[in-house]
Image: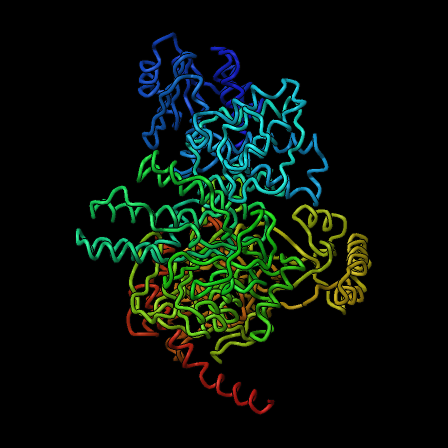
């Protein structure tokens, strides 16, 4: 269950008559517990409560108590030995009138009436396996409002299917934006009193909903009619009390979809919520999902959190503003200059979605401005920060509408907070008709026309905010000469996931820059356009991206182009989880990269919340300068053995055998044993999973085909390959008895997993004996000296591949041509090789001492055996002394040395490459 579904279930529970016997079970069901789980609790099979309540291990101990004993019962639950034994996270007590609960892990509490407990459902989301951040728990209103709006939206589309067509979906989204504004306005006195919009609909529309659309249409018409024009507009008296709003929000048609009884009920229920609690920075991205068919199923599951947005905005410019505020102290002149500076700052999000980044930037700047006003003794000073300085581009029309609406709401809330309700109301209406959020394709539009460097453009006042052309001209900035900061969280789609339109956009952006844009994630196009913008203006930019853009093949492809404009990386956040509140939502591991042209020495790298100042930040987000490491087919160190990908079957599993398959084959024909080999991929090696394959040479094929089971498998292999859409695979049908490669060792092989967890401290490489076959799920080095295994098992090599190779989520994706062939090592003496060989053997012996523990067991960082760790430490010491005569102090020093050595080792090759290129030109 997602958060919205849980909220709906909890709300339904609170609306029912309180049943003291059923409440605990209904409460747990609302958080997604299965019927079988509830049944076990009912029968006492899993319920170990010692207070007559219900105790779910590792989750909650809850009790229904007599009247007026809620606090006493909660204390008893907390002191209960059963609560402690079961490691319950929550305790809950209620008597059907009052409701109290505590999170024993955090110490947070809830105390409210029983009817009000659904407003705190976010407190209990961990019961559903949803990892929450504080902001999720504090956004219960936004989730409840989104849930109800979604139900209304779906109901209206069912009753008005034509509004769901491509031609009318925009009208539907426009209608929803109008409703959101009205719900907010009626609860914040913008509509001359509380609840006026909802109350008018309830009173003036028929209970059978036959004229609900007419009533709403008349209200919308009133809000689009100026006071002077109202006598001639012939408005109903009950609509005439609504203020003139305009601002493009109610201009254009006032067509309203027809309402069923259920839809009318939903509308009135939505209006009964307390819309003063809306968080525009959260609500925007949630309500966006209401109108998006692909996202509606994940309502309440994820959104961009404020802490993550501030990871972008703080180092980009907010930290500097706060430092200037601190320096100013109570100096009136310095405070005034800072206020003028803030008023001129322009924030531009070229992938703004529903406006989260713009809203947070606006609210943070208003907070700083309010502190300036307080120190200057001008607390009622009207804000000088115009909304039109917060520009955005969004491809889809509804998020673009919501972005502007969210900013309008944020402005009003800030005015109320810093100047008071009276002043905020006096200046709020009518809304301005200017449009500063552009609906269009950011990769095709000229950003300089959306956010001009001088601030001057052609004025554009839309007749209808929501039907502006994509090539719309822009409005003037209110304050000239300010700084521009580009920020945002563009779409990430990588190779293989781009639509045809996105591929066309990428080609458009990168044409004339590189032919290899296919290696670059979609977000790379935003970095290049931001760099181009910074070249034309004195701007800074910071974008969120998947970490893949600063590693693997992307780094040497993208960053030379981006940095060619003279920009440098001014700050960076190393890889972190871009948090969401869904346990089942795929994790997205991101980096944040800031760029500018200021040549400042104040560069910062943020890692796990800790920042450090550096002189330079490389395209790998490491301190200092680093060469671009490109894939190469053979090792740059001539004495390193070559690494290849293992044998690829391409047979639909025909040549692979399970443990039981092998037994069947051998029991039917003992001669099968000759053609069966142990088959290792990464998973099989790390977890000691027995897997086998058929390994048949051309010479032995006639004998193998005499065995019935083998003959069947070879025919299956032939059919699978002939049916492949790939030409090269079809050619393999001519030799169905062999894999695409037919590589094996004479003595031993070194196996290197293609993927390894970033939690590990070392690569779980190893040696397999003669006769073992390595699959394409791992890399292989055949018959190499054991000193090369020492290199593979070293911390130096792990640090290198963690930086140079790509990642899948947060796991390292090994690459032979990027990770091994580029690995720089100094010249090794025979003594060096002997010492390293002994180190590798000691590591293998330490592993053997813990048989039958698997590689996965041994390299779990929390359970790694002491003797194995010591063997690795000795290996690292021997190797690192070869490099610099001592142990490296940290990974930064390791990388600096490796990059230095790589540069020296490839200098000659680079010069040769350049000469060849010049000659061919």
Task: Determine the residue positioned at 47% across, 58% down.
Answer: 547
Q: Where residue 579 sits in the image (x, y, percent)?
A: 45, 45
Please name whichever residue, 418 or 904, is drawn nearer the observer in this view of the structure: 418
Q: Where residue 689 sits in the image (x, y, percent)?
A: 58, 49
- Residue 903 vs 411, above or below: the answer is below
Residue 246 appears in the picture as rendered = yes
Task: Determine the residue positioned at 32% across, 62% down.
Answer: 604
Furthest residue in direction top, as rendered? 66
Furthest residue in direction left, as rendered? 330
- Residue 221 vs 201, above or below: the answer is below
| Relative side of 788 to 383, left or right | right
Please name whichever residue, 683 or 536, is drawn nearer the observer in this view of the structure: 536
| Relative side of 542 to 163, left or right | left
Please name whichever residue, 824 or 920, is drawn nearer the observer in this view of the structure: 920
Rendered-image quadrant of the C terminus = bottom right
- Residue 858 vs 458, above or below: the answer is above
Task: Determine the residue positioned at 78% across, 52% down.
Answer: 709
Residue 859 appears in the picture as rendered = no
Tally the marks: 0
Q: Quadrant of residue 422?
A: top left
Q: Where residue 693 sits in the image (x, y, percent)?
A: 68, 57
| Relative side of 727 to 614, left or right | right
Q: Where residue 86 sits in the image (x, y, percent)?
A: 40, 25
Task: Determine the residue positioned at 46% across, 68% down.
Answer: 531
- Residue 329 vs 597, above or below: the answer is above
Please name whichever residue, 859 or 462, is drawn nearer the observer in this view of the structure: 462
Rendered-image quadrant of the N terminus = top right
Q: How is the image coloured?
A: rainbow
């Amino acid at each position: 269950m997602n958060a919205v579904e849980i909220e709906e279930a909890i709300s339904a529970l609170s609306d029912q008559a309180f049943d003291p016997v059923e409440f605990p079970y209904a409460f747990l069901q609302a958080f997604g517990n299965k019927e079988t789980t509830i049944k076990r609790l009912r029968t006492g099979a899993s319920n170990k409560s010692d207070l007559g309540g219900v105790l779910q291990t590792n989750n909650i101990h809850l009790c229904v108590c007599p009247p007026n004993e809620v606090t006493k019962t909660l204390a008893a639950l907390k002191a209960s030995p059963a609560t402690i034994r079961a490691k319950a996270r929550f305790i809950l007590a209620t008597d059907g009138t009052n409701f109290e609960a505590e999170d024993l892990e955090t110490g947070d509490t809830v105390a409210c009436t029983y009817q009000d407990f659904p407003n705190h459902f976010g407190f209990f989301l961990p019961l559903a396996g949803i990892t929450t951040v504080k902001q999720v728990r504090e956004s219960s209103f936004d989730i409840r409002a989104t849930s109800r709006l979604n139900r209304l939206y779906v109901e209206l589309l069912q009753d008005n299917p034509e509004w769901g067509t491509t031609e009318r979906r925009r009208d539907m989204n426009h209608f929803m934006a109008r409703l959101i504004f009205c719900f907010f306005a009626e609860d914040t006195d913008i509509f001359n009193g509380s609840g006026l919009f909802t109350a008018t609909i309830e009173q003036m529309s028929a209970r059978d909903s036959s004229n609900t659309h007419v009533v709403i249409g008349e209200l919308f018409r009133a809000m689009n009619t100026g006071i002077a024009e109202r006598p001639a507009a012939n408005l109903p008296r009950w609509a005439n009390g609504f203020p003139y709003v305009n601002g493009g929000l109610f201009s254009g048609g006032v067509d309203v979809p027809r309402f069923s009884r259920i839809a009318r009920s939903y509308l009135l229920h939505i209006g009964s919520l307390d819309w003063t609690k809306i968080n525009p920075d959260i609500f925007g991205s949630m309500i966006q999902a209401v109108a998006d068919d692909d996202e509606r199923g994940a309502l309440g599951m994820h959104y961009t959190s404020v802490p993550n947005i501030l990871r972008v905005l703080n180092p980009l410019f907010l930290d500097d503003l706060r430092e200037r505020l601190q320096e100013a102290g109570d100096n009136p002149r310095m405070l005034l200059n800072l206020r003028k500076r803030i008023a001129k700052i322009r924030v531009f999000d070229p992938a703004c979605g529903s406006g989260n980044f713009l809203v947070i930037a606006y609210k943070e700047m208003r907070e700083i401005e309010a502190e300036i006003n307080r120190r200057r003794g001008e607390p009622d000073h009207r804000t000088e920060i115009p909304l039109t300085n917060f520009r955005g581009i969004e491809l889809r029309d509804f998020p673009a509408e919501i972005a502007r609406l969210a900013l309008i709401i944020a402005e009003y809330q800030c005015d109320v907070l810093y100047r008071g309700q009276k002043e905020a109301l006096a200046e709020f209406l009518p809304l301005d008709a200017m449009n500063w959020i552009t609906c269009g394709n950011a990769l095709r539009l000229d950003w300089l026309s959306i956010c001009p460097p001088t601030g001057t453009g052609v004025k554009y006042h839309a007749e209808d905010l929501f039907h502006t052309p994509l090539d719309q001209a822009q409005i003037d900035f209110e304050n000239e000469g300010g700084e521009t900061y580009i920020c945002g969280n563009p779409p990430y789609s990588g190779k293989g996931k781009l639509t045809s339109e996105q591929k066309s956009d990428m080609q458009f952006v990168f044409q004339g820059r590189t032919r290899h844009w296919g290696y670059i994630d979609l977000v790379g196009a935003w970095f290049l356009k931001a760099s181009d913008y910074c070249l034309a203006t004195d701007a800074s930019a910071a974008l969120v991206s998947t970490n893949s853009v600063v590693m693997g093949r992307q780094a040497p492809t993208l960053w030379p182009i981006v940095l060619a404009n003279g920009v440098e990386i001014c700050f960076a956040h190393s890889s972190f989880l871009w948090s969401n509140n869904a346990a089942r939502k795929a994790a997205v591991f991101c980096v944040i990269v800031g760029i500018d042209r200021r040549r400042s020495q104040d560069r910062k790298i943020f890692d796990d919340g800790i920042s450090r100042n550096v002189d330079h930040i490389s395209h790998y987000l490491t301190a200092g300068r680093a060469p671009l490491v490109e894939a190469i087919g053979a090792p740059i160190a001539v004495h390193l053995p070559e690494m290849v990908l293992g044998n690829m079957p391409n047979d639909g599993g025909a040549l692979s055998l399970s443990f039981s398959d092998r037994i069947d084959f051998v029991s039917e024909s003992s001669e099968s044993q000759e053609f069966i080999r142990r088959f290792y991929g990464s998973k099989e090696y790390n977890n000691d999973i027995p897997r086998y394959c058929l390994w048949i040479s051309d010479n032995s094929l006639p004998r193998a085909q005499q065995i019935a089971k083998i003959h069947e498998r070879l025919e299956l292999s032939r059919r699978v390959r002939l049916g492949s859409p790939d030409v090269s695979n079809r050619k393999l049908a001519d030799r169905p008895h062999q894999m695409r490669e037919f590589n094996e060792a004479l003595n031993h092989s070194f196996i290197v997993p293609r993927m390894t967890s970033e939690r590990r401290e070392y690569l779980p490489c190893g040696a397999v004996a003669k006769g073992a076959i390595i699959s394409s799920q791992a890399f292989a080095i055949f018959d190499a000296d054991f000193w090369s295994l020492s290199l593979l098992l070293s911390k130096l090599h792990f640090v290198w591949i963690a930086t140079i190779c790509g990642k899948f989520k947060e796991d390292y994706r090994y690459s032979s041509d990027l990770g091994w062939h580029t690995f720089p090592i100094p010249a090794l003496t025979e003594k060096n090789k002997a010492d390293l060989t002994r180190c590798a053997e000691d590591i293998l012996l330490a592993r053997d001492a813990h048989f039958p523990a698997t590689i996965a067991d041994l390299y779990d960082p929390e359970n790694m055996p002491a003797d194995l760790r010591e063997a690795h430490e000795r290996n690292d010491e021997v190797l690192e002394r070869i490099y610099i005569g001592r142990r490296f102090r940290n990974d930064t020093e390791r990388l600096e040395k490796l990059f230095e050595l790589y540069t020296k080792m490839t200098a000659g090759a680079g010069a040769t490459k350049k000469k060849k290129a010049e000659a061919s030109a």
